[in-house]
Amino acid sequence: MLDRLFDADVALPASALGALELHQLFKSTYDGIWRLLRGLGVPTDRLDDAAQQVFLVYAERHADVVRGSERAFLFGTALRVAHVVRRGTHREVPVEIDYAPSEQPSVDELTDQKRARQVLDRILDQLDPELRDVFVLYELEGFTMPEIAGIVEVPLGTAASRLRRGRERFSALVRRYSTFGPPSLQEDAR
């Protein structure tokens, strides 16, 4: 139904315009929300549900959102949803689902990508949540520091400090991983 609204040359009622705006916002931000949730440690099997929850919150609260700050509202909501999901999820046995892109890489490339993602996830999991939030938003999602300060609701100086400390901790964890090599398979099973 929403796709037909794009082709309509008639005046639309307010409810249809709201649905159209939500549809366009969904199309333009869903991939970024999904990546952010993934980067914040939401388990793969819960990503789609968590992303849907972000948009459900927006749909319920869209009247309260200041025009022009919809994207910041969505990403801030994603941070809170990720924290709730991680708190309620026990990651005893991670479930990994690989979706092959249309241009299928080789099995070796897929294996390397999966290992690299597991290493990144393991390292990010070791960052304090407030450092991880800022680090992921800046380094992986490309937000500016003023945007991040608004999303995580802290002063700009605090956000910058968290990014600096997050980078330091991330670098230390990467060095430790590089020095001692990958953890044993038993650690993966925990």
Image (tube, rainbow, N blue to C red):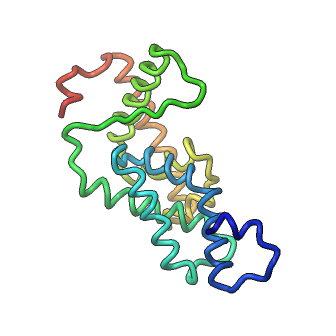
- Can you give x and y, in whole percent of width and height, for residue 106 in the image? 51, 15
- Residue at 19% x, 40% y is 92
Q: Is 47 drawn above or below residue 81 in the view shown?
A: above
User: Looking at this view, is 125 or 114 the one in front?
Assistant: 114
User: Looking at this view, is 10 or 133 the one in front?
Assistant: 10
- Residue at 40% x, 57% y is 50
| Quarter of the rendering occupied by the N terminus | bottom right
Name which quarter of the figure residue 185 lies in: top left
- Can you give x and y, in whole percent of width and height, for residue 120 in the image? 42, 32
Q: Is 50 drawn above or below residue 108 in the view shown?
A: below
Q: Is 153 drawn above or below residue 62 in the view shown?
A: above
- Can you give x and y, in whole percent of width and height, for residue 19 in the image? 61, 74
- Residue at 39% x, 18% y is 178
- Can you give x and y, in whole percent of width and height, for residue 38 in the image? 43, 45
Left/right of residue 90 with respect to residue 26 in the rendered view: left
User: Looking at this view, is 19 or 116 the one in front?
Assistant: 19
Q: Is 108 drawn above or below residue 154 in the view shown?
A: above
